[in-house]
Amino acid sequence: MVVSSGACSTARRQDIDRAKGLAIVLVVFGHLVARADPLGVHWYEPLRRAVYTFHMPFFLYLSGIVAVFSGALYTRPENWTALCNARARRLLIPFFAIGSLIVFGKFLTQQFLYVDNHAASLGAALANLVWHTADSPAGCIWYLFVLFLLTLLAPVLLWANFGGLYYLLIAGFILYCLPLPAYLYLDQFGKYGIFFCIGAFAASRDERWTAFVDRRWRPLLLLFLCLLALIAGFGKNWPVRPELFLVGILSLPALHGLVRHSSIPSAAMLLWLGENSFVIYLFNTIFIGIAKALLLRITDWNGSHFLIFALVMLLSGIFGPILLRQMLFKRVEILDRYTR
């Protein structure tokens, strides 16, 4: 996500970057276990279940805010082609590049290293990147494809309704309630688009929204944490859609209010991670997979071993992509442009 230099104040851009930093750490945490759970580990899955009720809603909310601040959401019809081209360069090229890298990487390495979620054939794996997306070998990057669709369709809907963001919220809620199929990531589009719309609506009323967030974030954060504890402890069989909607919406003012204060612990670290969130998102699962495969050559990841695995994989998923960008991508202009 990129905010234009004149779109908002420096403090506000840092505020959003800190939020992105928090969100991307949660994304990496959720990717530590892909398919088969480690044996004898009873703490990770409840925590991941709780994290999955809000981390991507929060990411899409931030994306909606940026879409308003950057002006992309208010693109006029004569500029839609240019918007489509710009969004394709920013989102689809990395999506297909990383997706293909993951597919080919799995096929090359599965002969001698453990690989999660490998397909029966190379052709099926490539097709599933965009078609049978419930079986996508690179489902971890669905956000790029969904954000591309959102940032193209939202300006059309706004133009058709004379800029009325209320209609955008209504459309997002309707899509959330529809059982969309898992083709072209339409299920994810419907599931998370509402949070993009909420972010756009909040950004359009920036002063009133941030005033509300600054007043209420502490009690909302407490309520949010209590809900997460209940979900982690008892929510294994709770209905997903109502839970995601309730916790996802509650997380927006709670977490946004938390990161709006530069005095919070690790504020500088969150800001730095937020500035590198795109490259972390693109490459975190690759570095997690490499770390896991190498560790599995030494020992299994069951029981108490998983604590070491989780720590090494988390650090690899966060700092590996940043190191890759610093050492390689920044030296090659085209790579730097697509990973910044």
Image: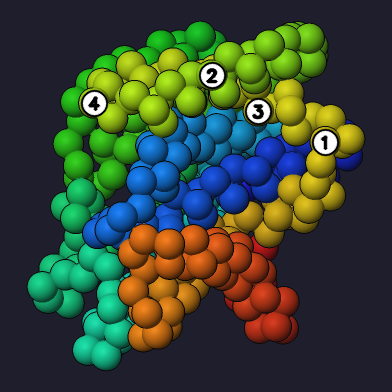
N-terminal of the pair, mark 3 or mark 2, is 2
What whole-number distance in Å separates the C-alpha atoms at marks 4 and 3?
26 Å
- In this picture, residue 296 sits left or right of residue 65: left
The amino acid marked with disc number 4 is Asn
Q: Which residue is mark 2?
A: 226
**Residue 226: percent from the left, percent from the top?**
54, 19
Residue 255 got which mark? 3
**Residue 31: percent from the left, percent from the top?**
42, 55
Secondary structure under the numbered disc 3 in the rendered image? helix
- Judge the density around disc 3: few (<14), some (14-19), many (≥20) Cα neighbours within 10 Å: many
Q: Nearer the viewer, residue 68 or 278?
A: 278
What whole-number distance in Å separates the C-alpha atoms at marks 3 and 2?
14 Å
45 in relation to 232, above or below = below
Q: Nearer the viewer, residue 5 or 45?
A: 45
What whole-number distance in Å separates the C-alpha atoms at marks 2 and 1?
20 Å
The amino acid marked with disc number 1 is Ile
What whole-number distance in Å separates the C-alpha atoms at marks 4 and 2?
18 Å
- In this picture, residue 40 sits left or right of residue 157: left
Q: Residue at x 17, y 77 (%)?
A: 122
The amino acid marked with disc number 2 is Cys
Q: Which residue is mark 1?
A: 264
For residue 45, which quarter of the picture?
top left
N-terminal of the pair, mark 4 or mark 2, is 2
Residue 237 got which mark? 4
